[in-house]
Amino acid sequence: MRILSRFWAALAVLVLGGSVLTTAQDAPLTVVTHDSFAVSEEVLAAFTAETGITVEIVRVGDTGSSPVLAEADIDPAFLLDPDLRVIPVDFGDVCLNYDVAYFEENALPVPQTLADLTDPQYRGLLVVQNPASS
């Protein structure tokens, strides 16, 4: 359900932002995304049934393997490299969760900042995805 909600929200931003299409009959909504983007045919069909807009998914690789999209209309706020050697694929929040009981049982104060995590007392307690491949 959460993936479905995010999909609807992302499409709403694109459509309501006016940067994608003028009417449902003009052209399909093309979503350029990473290879691991997952959306079911049922979700796409439901979106088309509700809006009249056909969605075309174009997968262009995952982090580290995406080809350069020379013709991409990239929002300057996300432009990391003027030569387009690095392009934004997606973005989102990163949340750190912690085990309350573990910190209480080990009399450790809960870190309050990212800098706190560099303290040796937290060594080995944080696991994160590799942003180069996740």
Image: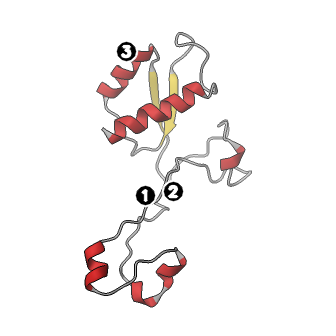
For the C terminus, which image quadrant? bottom left
* Residue positioned most to the right: 82
Rendering coords of residue 20 (x, y %): 60, 25
Residue beneath the point at 54% across and 47% down = 89
Left or right position of 89 against 82 = left
The residue under label 1 is 134
Residue beneath the point at 50% across and 41% down = 60
The amino acid beneath tag 3 is Ala
Left or right position of 131 against 88 = left
Label ID, residue 64: 2
| Camera-nearest label, 2 or 1 | 1
Q: Secondary structure at mark 2?
A: loop
Q: Secondary structure at mark 1?
A: loop
Q: Secondary structure at mark 3?
A: helix
Is 97 placed above or below 86 here? below
The residue under label 3 is 49
Q: Choose between 107 and 17: the one closer to the eye.
A: 107
The numbered mark, 3 or 1, whose residue comes first in the sequence reads 3
> Do the residues under discs 2 and 1 have CB atoms within 8 angstroms?
no
Rendering coords of residue 65 (x, y %): 50, 52
The numbered mark, 2 or 3, whose residue comes first in the sequence reads 3
Rendering coords of residue 50 (x, y %): 39, 16
Count of numbered circles in the view: 3
Residue beneath the point at 40% across and 84% down = 122
